[in-house]
Amino acid sequence: MKLISQMIIAFFALSIITSCAHMKDHSNKVTFQEKSFNKNFQYRSYKGKVFMSGQPTASNLKELKEKEGVTVVINLRNKTEFKKLSYNPNNDAEKLGLKYYNLPFFNNKEITQENINAIEAVFMKHHKKGEKVLVNCSSGNRVGAWFAAHVKTTHKDNNVNKLMTLAKGAGLKSTGLENKLEAYLKK
């Protein structure tokens, strides 16, 4: 009987150790699935619940809604940038029945916690409800930087190297924005 008890305890201990080791191995691995409806619009998917892209057109939004189930759009562009567009992203999203938010990521000088908090409040409100969210900007650079700021702020991860890798995987390519993000992450 004592041998059976020891074997059961050993089995549970091994199960717990294996489980913890398995969680540790995967906790730092974040992968983005590159997707495209056509050659002119590429986007990234994170766990099929968060979508990231440059500026979508009305037809891109329609496809994201129909094919991916996106119901919320968070645009990280500054309002002054919309003057350059031949369409209104807010109107396009609303016509499709999507919830639309324009929350600028930064003030062109620095990334502020105030901006991050505003984006996080809206993102988490919808994400926690299980809604699929598209976060976009003009090219995907700010989206990548936002994702790293999101992980730092919401998931309390302060590993700057890891966060910079996440940002690049999510779309950050601009050296200037990389420098601003790194300064923010080191605060």
Image (tube, rainbow, N blue to C red):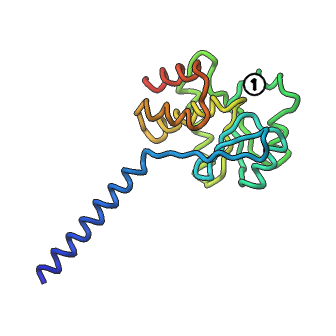
Q: Secondary structure at mark 1?
A: helix
The answer to whether 61 appears left or right of 72 in the picture is right
Q: Position of residue 52 (x, y in %)?
A: 66, 40
Location of mark 1 (residue): 79
Q: Is residue 148 left or right of residue 156?
A: right
Q: Is residue 102 left or right of residue 22?
A: right
Drawn side of residue 73 relative to residue 120, left or right: right
- Name the residue type under label 1: Lys
Location of residue 137 (image quadrant): top right
Q: Out of 3 and 88, give the one closest to the viewer.
A: 3
Q: Indicate whether 91 appears above or below 107.
A: below
What residue is shown at x 55% (from left), y 23% (from top)?
178
| Image quarter of the N terminus | bottom left
- The residue lying at 66 percent from left, 51 percent from top is 132
Image quadrant where one finds the C terminus: top left
Give x and y (percent) for residue 44: 65, 43
Q: Image height check: is 179 above or below 4?
A: above
- Judge whether 116 appears above or below 132 on screen: above
Residue occupying image coordinates x 63% and y 29%: 142
Q: Nearer the viewer, residue 89 or 45?
A: 45
At which x and y percent is residue 162?
44, 35
